[in-house]
Image: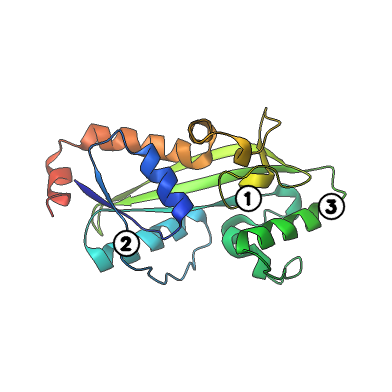
Amino acid sequence: MKLLLATQNRGKIEEISRMLRHLNIELIKPEEEIEVEESGKSFMENAYLKALAYFKRYGIPTLADDSGLVVPSLEGYPGIYSSRFYSLDWGGKEEVQNSKDQANIKKLLRLLEGSKDRRAYFKAVICLMLSEEFYIFAEGVCHGEIAESPRGSAGFGYDPIFKPLGYEKTIAELPPEEKDDLSHRGKAIRKLSHFIEKCKHSIFYQRAHSN
């Protein structure tokens, strides 16, 4: 069985591959990135748009993820704009010096400077598309708060400044297996894994993976 991962993000590919390694599935990385206009107004809509674009291009079952960090005290930003938060006029643009991830973090910390409400949560929505007519979603949420400064070298994105609920360490300070257990993407992938396990022997599923 083959499953295309609709992303060129190395961090996501490593995480998803690690989480699905117990299944008898051949994970395919796309040969080239497809420019997908993320015009949706939610993580679910954008996950669907990504899955559809890659499915149309490669013609095999596709898994797409859309995820981000939500900070209630910042009106829900970065939210669906998490990957390009630095470039938004809202809150003032941040210059990219070393990486986009660092620019996003710098902007977020600047906007939260002096704030006592540092609550935040990561949200991930996974779309598994077996055909243009048959697709499912799985969602995961991880609650926590924003640290005062970046810590840790593991992970990617906002991981160095996000402390999961009940933790003093940031996500970027945790070993991969521990991160998978509590992360938003880990929760969504586990839900998806249960679905795959249950339907692996269905006629439709076998047809969808016959290529």
Name which of mark 1 and mark 2 comes first in the sequence: 2
Helix, strand or loop status at disc 2: loop
Image height of 60 relative to 19, above or below: below
In x, y percent, where is residue 180?
A: 48, 35
In x, y percent, where is residue 183?
A: 53, 37
**What kind of residue is marked 1?**
Tyr
Badge 3 density bin: few <14, some 14–19, many ≥20, Cα 10 Å: few
In the drawing, what numbered circle is on residue 158? 1
The residue shown at (22%, 36%) is 199
Task: Please tell me in which quadrant of the rendered image residue 87 appears.
Answer: bottom right
Helix, strand or loop status at disc 1: loop
In the drawing, what numbered circle is on residue 113? 3
Mark 2–mark 3 Cα distance, whole angstroms, equals 40 Å
**What kind of residue is marked 3?**
Glu
Answer with left or right where residue 193 lies relative to residue 69.
left
Circles 1, 2 touching at the beta carbon (< 8 Å): no
Name which of mark 2 and mark 3 comes first in the sequence: 2
Badge 2 density bin: few <14, some 14–19, many ≥20, Cα 10 Å: some
Circles 1, 3 touching at the beta carbon (< 8 Å): no
Q: Residue furthest top?
A: 166
Residue nearest the viewer, comparing 91 with 28: 28
**What kind of residue is marked 2?**
Pro
Task: Please tell me in which quadrant of the rendered image residue 192 appears.
Answer: top left
Q: Identify residue for label 2.
A: 30
Circles 2, 3 touching at the beta carbon (< 8 Å): no
Residue nearest the viewer, comparing 166 with 99: 99
